[in-house]
Image: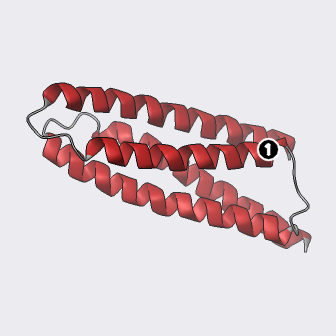
Amino acid sequence: MEQLVKMSIYIHMAVAVFLILSQLAYFLIKNEESFIKFSKKFRNLLLVQNIIFGMTAFTGIIVMAVTRFTLWNLEIFLMIFLAIGIFVHQIILYKKIRPIKSTEKELQEKFKKYASKVYLSEAVAGVVLYILARILN
């Protein structure tokens, strides 16, 4: 049973690292000159991030189920809080990019700055939480 718990935690942590890397992938497409190309790449990135986010949430639930929902501490509450924050920000980012037209340069730049702040803060929060989880275990 102990091996199952450890394996579940390692898989969850690996998927969480992929989520952090996918958030940092935004900075690879941020400097795209054409907003149409940027928008397509951004929507594809959102799709990939949502899949990885779903995997992270699913593996987290599996870890909780394997431990019979007896493992509750600050780390778990922070993970749930971060997951809710990421979920809400993904929805907000998608809703903000939809109405922007390719001719509205000012709105495009505002969106890119906002998205940069969101992704950087999510990635930093994910790294801090990952380090905290490794230290506490």
Residue 61 lies, with reference to residue 117, above or below; the image says below
In the image, what residue occupies the spot 58% across and 33% down? 124
Residue 127 lies, with reference to residue 69, above or below; the image says above
SS for dot 1: helix
In the image, what residue occupies the spot 86% across and 64% down? 69
In the image, what residue occupies the spot 32% across and 41% down? 96
Residue positioned most to the left: 103
Compared across the picture, whether 31 is left or right of 28 comes to left
- Within 10 Å of disc 1 (Cα), the crowding (few <14, some 14-19, many 20+) is some
Of 21 and 114, which appears nearest the observer? Answer: 114
* Amino acid type, label 1: Glu
Of 45 and 78, which appears nearest the observer? Answer: 78
Q: Quadrant of residue 14?
A: bottom right
Report x, y in % for residue 15. 60, 58
Of 101 and 66, which appears nearest the observer? Answer: 101
Q: Quadrant of residue 136?
A: top right
Q: Quadrant of residue 27?
A: top left
Compared across the picture, whether 96 is left or right of 79 comes to left
Report x, y in % for residue 94. 35, 48
Q: Say how the picture is coloured.
A: secondary structure
Residue 53 lies, with reference to residue 135, above or below; the image says below
Report x, y in % for residue 45. 36, 53
Residue 128 lies, with reference to residue 63, above or below; the image says above
Compared across the picture, whether 29 is left or right of 63 comes to left
How many numbered discs? 1
Q: Quadrant of the N terminus?
A: bottom right
Report x, y in % for residue 52. 51, 60
Please give the residue where the numbered disc 1 appears in the rendered image. 75
